[in-house]
Amino acid sequence: MSYIPKMPLNDERPASTSSGEDQGSDVESSSERCDSMTSTSNRESFTSDCSSKHSTPSSSPPKTLTLDVVMDSARDLSNLTLAHEMIVNGNFCLEPKSLPQDSLWKIVRDIVHKAFWDILESELNDDPPEYGQAIRLLEEIREILLSFLNPGANRMRTQIMEVLDMDLIRQQAENDAVDIQGLASYIITTMGKMCAPARDEEIKKLRESSDNKVTLFREVFRVLDLMKADTVNFTIDNLRPVLQRQGVEYEREKFQSILDKTPSALEHTTSWIKSALEELSTTIPKEQPNGPGKGQRLVPGPFQILNTAFLSILTWDYDKSPLPETWMTDETRLREIQRKLQQYQAVNEVLLIVYSTVGGPIQDLPSLSDRMKRMISVLLDGMHSPGFNLEEALKGVSAQICCELNKSLTERNYPALTPALQGTLTGQICSITQKDNPIRTLVEDRVQHYFMALICDPKPQVKLETVPAGLTAIKPELALMGAKFISLVNYNKAVYGPFYADIIRKLMFISNPPAANHPQDTTQDSITSN
């Protein structure tokens, strides 16, 4: 957002308000409304239902993009990204900017700042003192303090203007009568009235400081920077409930604005949905097997296409192609979900191999299972980091697992694992690095089925704890990732549903002209009609 209102502040102190409201689904997704109208004989109704005035996206005709248009689109995208982050991330806040230690910007900034403070110190140490730099400093501090006030704080505004009266201070400077220490004391006292409780300790240090005037003012500016960040975060906390109520419409309008200025803004989104349609076209039956439409070609439904597209986001190859434009504001969250999910899948695969290889002697021992799970999770932590050698890590996992198993077996009077069995176990565990490994394929397929069931269900929260057979070991982690992903999907669907419906309608008309009169595949109606 390009504008952030001032923090409501009079003489009272701000208190952080992080109240969050559940995201209302008051805007119905057009793709959801139109799912039952996907046979080519009903294309007309699909078109009309998905083009209501309040939700139909529009695309501008091709045009030459000027620099101003590009910059406007960039501002819209920045506002959209910030608003989305405030809505979906309850912990979102702004921190005072810190530059990398050896960066050119930091070097330049430090040089400029040092020059400013050196000039100030030199002027104040002159005999008689010079106050030009000090007056500029006090004027900037005054403006910062005034910026913290709301429009109704007239008494404090008047007091600040009277004490930090620049005309009066300039007259005093001409007569070498400026009370720098007294002004500093007033500024610190005023900051103490305005700051959040978290800054009380910083204000106390300023009051008790015995540093020279230049060092004191340097510290005053540091604390003022912290207070500016507090002001912005206080505003964010107050805006968040409003944005959560109006976020769907706001984000949709912002994206429509981007689309109006940049007609190609849905290029990757169209390719993403087209891939889902092509994938479904190869898996559904070519013809209706029986019934009134026997012998006619089947086509996937809009909501079925969208569900398949959403599922593909979980396994998105970020090195191969960029995310759809409608998902770019969630890229960091999606990458994190994908990384966590792959790690949990690896943990589950190792446990499945262990139990299928060793068998009965270690069955029904939850404490052993928990220990092995924690051990594997720790050793595979960071498996997506650059330079992480997964195969070597899995060898380490195998060695630790064998030690843990031998300890458990001997404690219960079972024979330890033979060297041959340990070698087999190690080989099978290390083989999960291969994409065609049967255990890996099995686990990945069942995880996909789990997430598809959540995507298709109108009440996915009920199914979060219902995991497929063979995934019980990672049930809590799977439920957590499922809840996070479904929350993102549902919000994304609410915001961009009209855009998706428009794309799907166009793609289906291109691939299946109305004259063909092809019926819809009804095999998944029960799971897509939510």
Image: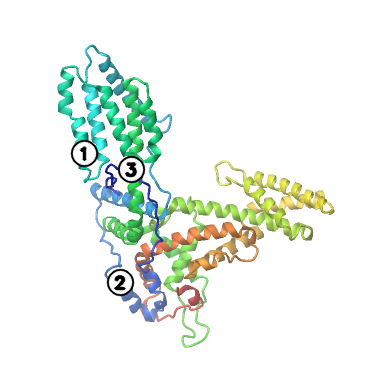
Q: Report the residue at 42% width, 80% height from top.
A: 518
Is residue 322 visible in the rendered image? The answer is no
Q: Where residue 367 appears, x then y in whole percent?
A: 71, 54
Q: Is residue 46 above or below residue 402?
A: below
Quick one: label 2, few (<14), some, or many (20+) residues within 10 Å?
Answer: some
Q: Is residue 119 above or below residue 9?
A: above
Report the Cα–Cα distance between label 1 and label 3: 16 Å
Report the Cα–Cα distance between label 2 and label 1: 52 Å
Check disc 2 and report its element: helix, strand or loop.
loop
Is residue 432 visible in the rendered image? The answer is yes
Q: Is residue 72 above or below residue 171?
A: below
Sequence-wise, the earlier of marks 2 and 1 is: 2
Residue 51 image label: 2
Sequence-wise, the earlier of marks 1 and 3 is: 3
Q: On the picture, is 120 further left or further right than 33?
A: left
Q: Where residue 396 appears, x then y in whole percent?
A: 69, 44
Q: Which residue is mark 3?
A: 13
Residue type beneath disc 1: Arg
Sequence-wise, the earlier of marks 2 and 3 is: 3
Q: Which residue is mark 1?
A: 157
Q: Nearer the viewer, mark 2 or mark 3?
A: 3
Q: Where residue 459 appears, x then y in whole percent?
A: 48, 69
Report the Cα–Cα distance between label 2 and label 3: 49 Å
